[in-house]
Image (tube, helix red, strand yellow):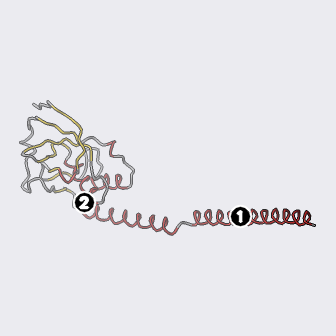
Amino acid sequence: MTNRTTERVVTVRPSRVLYTQQSVEGEFHNGTKLSELFRQILYEEVDLGQLPLIEVVRINRKMWCLDGNKRLRVFQELEHCGICERVKMRYLSNKVLDRTDVKHLTAAEGRSIHVQDVDFDNQIKMITADWRKMLKRNQSDVEGGDTHETFDESFQAVCFKYVMTISSLCLLLLFLYHLSLLIDQLK
């Protein structure tokens, strides 16, 4: 039986959490592939706040994923992209590890997990490459300015020049008028 004497939400770097399984299926229970969740989070189609919290426990001064190894793998991939650098997780202290027969410390000491999807790594690489290309395109659009922004900025600049020119002419006419009045007074 599980004893949850203390539960709290902590914010942790996914890379600091170790796996308690050697492998996981390539899909969640609802049929969504791990690589698809990765893409959805990367493109901001899914908010991290919508996902269930990963449950972690501390064993021998190390943080272990008790529940959510699939999500942890996705979050670690996102962390490599600079997204998801810290994730909220449910920290369970004083928890009796009643699932150690099913989930156990892995041969790789929890540092890696095998995803049972032959294309997982390639899909992650392709999705990441496409995302980085999109970021570069967006960045060059901002730096170079797209046509609409350039037109607006040019139009504002031209209007400002005309307003300044008209203002300068008005001031010049006002000055000439006062100068003519001054000359008339001196005569």
Residue sitting at x 24%, y 38%: 9
Image location of residue 104, percent across then percent down:
8, 46
Residue 67 falls in which quadrant of the image? top left
In the image, which is nearer the foreground, mark 1 or mark 2? 1
Relative to the observer, which residue lies in front, 145 or 26?
145
For this view, does 8 lie left or right of residue 43?
Answer: left
Residue sitting at x 36%, y 52%: 40
Image location of residue 117, percent across then percent down:
22, 57
Amino acid type at image mark 2: Phe
The relative height of residue 85 versus residue 126 in the rendered view (above or below) is above
Please tell me how crowded label 1 is: few (under 14), some (14-19), or many (20+) other residues with Cα within 10 Å.
few
Relative to the observer, which residue lies in front, 125 or 133?
133
Amino acid type at image mark 1: Met
Relative to the observer, which residue lies in front, 42 or 166?
166
The relative height of residue 153 versus residue 85 in the rendered view (above or below) is below
Judging from the image, what secondary structure is the residue with disc 1 in?
helix
Residue behind mark 2: 120
Image location of residue 161, percent across then percent down:
69, 66
Residue behind mark 1: 164
Q: In 3D space, how far apart are the residues under numbered discs 1 and 2 (Cα atoms)?
A: 61 Å
Image location of residue 119, percent across then percent down:
25, 62
